[in-house]
Amino acid sequence: MFEYTEPLHHLIEELKKFPGVGAKSAQRMAFYLLSISMEEANRLADAILEAKRKIFYCSVCNGITHVDPCPLCTDPHRSDELLCIVEEPYNVASIEKTGIFNGRYHVLLGTLSPLKGKGPEELGVDKLLSRIEKGKFKEIILATNPTSEGEATAFYLASLLKKFPVKITRLATGLPVGSDLDFADQITIRRALEGRVELKD
Amino acid sequence: MPLDFTEAIVLRSFPSGELDKIVVFFSRDKGLIKGRAKGARKFGNRFGSSLEPMSYVKVFYYEKERQDFVTISQCDLLESFLDLQTDFETSCFLSYWAELIEEFYPARIKEELLFRLLLSCLRALKEGGNRHFITNYFEIWLLRLSGLLPDTRRCQRCHRQLSQQVWLSPKKDGFLCERCSLEKKEPLPSDLITFINWTKKNSPFERAPLSPDISRQLAPIIQSWLIYHLEKEPRSLKFLKT
Ligand SMILES: [Zn+2]
Ligand SMILES: [Zn+2]
């Protein structure tokens, strides 16, 4: 069987570890990397190393940051009464882009997932609870994904948060913008009905 | 590349690449099928909630030669069990069922009885059945369908009729009478034998013949058989113990 020269084989093996990258894509990426200049290759390598050296998880919210605590946690213009709990650091970016949320975040770095061996302990629930205990939050928004794992996580957290005098909310689920009612399944339509809002003028 | 379809239950799904999901189905007439749902991670995609674990669906797919995954072109939701999974403990039990099926039946082979078992257990749970009891029921039938459940009528070694007092054979594949049981251990709980016999004639929708407490006591015994035959402990099992 034909085999690539060892350094190339090594590069392909490393690229295959990327999420969603299979043997074919890894091969394509490796050949692309071989085609770029030494200068470009150095820039890429440096960018990876610099990101790895300088970026870490915020000790307060688990978001990614280069200063601890992160700017979102220390920004005096943000409200300390609102907390939004999300699954992944990139979810923070998605919500920030809307510009309508002005509270604090907490990143779970995953969801409860028995098949992945992730239970309450692995999810760092204790850290979250002690943060809420010490904080002055009035509303906690559970912004996990509307998937079975995301929902199980939200309901689990809600059961733990009941003991705090806070309002607990969940992001509305329902019809995606630009979709057609005909193509929505019964779960989606039911959720949309449950989460309906009054039209006011 | 002909289009094929089957009724199936989603065992699990996970993201693949930026937009796709890989979905593991247990189908009524073809056993385990793994497929790629293109664009299933996109907002407002056509798959809706149909690819969530334990969704009972009709799935349409194409198959290309020499590929691990079929390509899912459409997936219609027939019945959803998503609401059950808002409870973390119940979702742990369902993950455990899914894991058992995938471990015991990893191939594309028709296992219709197992499919019907899974669907009725899901429905029984949805109708308010006790998750410990239904899980025992599921486990016993999984062992029975796999030919791994010991015969409760006769001693495996001497073939004498068994009383309510039985011992498990060293290979965990048969029951022994008192005379044949070499190890001087405690016999198995008589509730277990009663329960095994009960499952043969009753559906999971029937009133449980066991209290939830007894159900919980029997669970580790039944699970030790499953672990013995699997030669490993299912990953989701540790979450059932807490
Ligand atoms: Zn932070
Ligand atoms: Zn005997």
Image: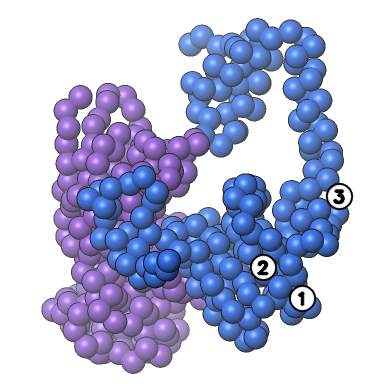
Chain colours: A blue, B purple
What is the quadrant of residue A200 in the picture? bottom left
Residue A134: x, y in percent?
Answer: 78, 78
Name the side, left or right, on which A26 lies relative to B30.
Answer: right
For marks 2 and 3, the one nearer the N-term is 3
Q: Quarter of the image for the C terminus of chain B: give it.
A: bottom right
Q: Is residue B201 among what the camera can see?
A: yes
Contact between marks 1 and 2 (CB within 8 A): the answer is yes
Element marked by disc 3: loop
- Count residues near mark 1 (Cα–Cα under 10 Å), then give few for <14, some for 14-19, many for 20+: few
Q: Does dot 2 land on a helix, a strand or a loop?
A: strand
Q: Which residue is mark 3?
A: A67
Q: Amino acid at mark 1?
A: Gly
N-term-proximal mark, 1 vs 2: 2
Residue B21: x and y in percent read 41, 42
Answer yes or no: are tags 3 and 1 on the same subunit.
yes
**In the rendered view, does A62 fall on the left or right side of A167?**
right
Give coordinates of residue B218: x percent, y percent: 39, 82
Circle 1 chain: A
**Which residue: 42% across, 38% down?**
B20
Against B64, is B45 above or below? Answer: below
The residue under the point 40% across, 78% down is B219
The vertical placement of B106 against B100, above or below, is: above
Residue at which label 2 appears: A83
At a point 19% along the width and 84% down the height, the residue shown is B206
The answer for which chain carries disc 3 is A
Which corner quadrant of the image does residue B167 belong to? Answer: bottom left
Q: What is the distance, in whole Å, between disc 1 and disc 2 at their CAs? A: 10 Å
Residue A169 marker? none
Q: Is residue B180 visible?
A: no
| Residue marked by disc 1 | A135
Real-space Cα separation, disc 3 to disc 1, in angstroms:
21 Å
Q: Position of residue A133 (x, y in %)?
A: 74, 79
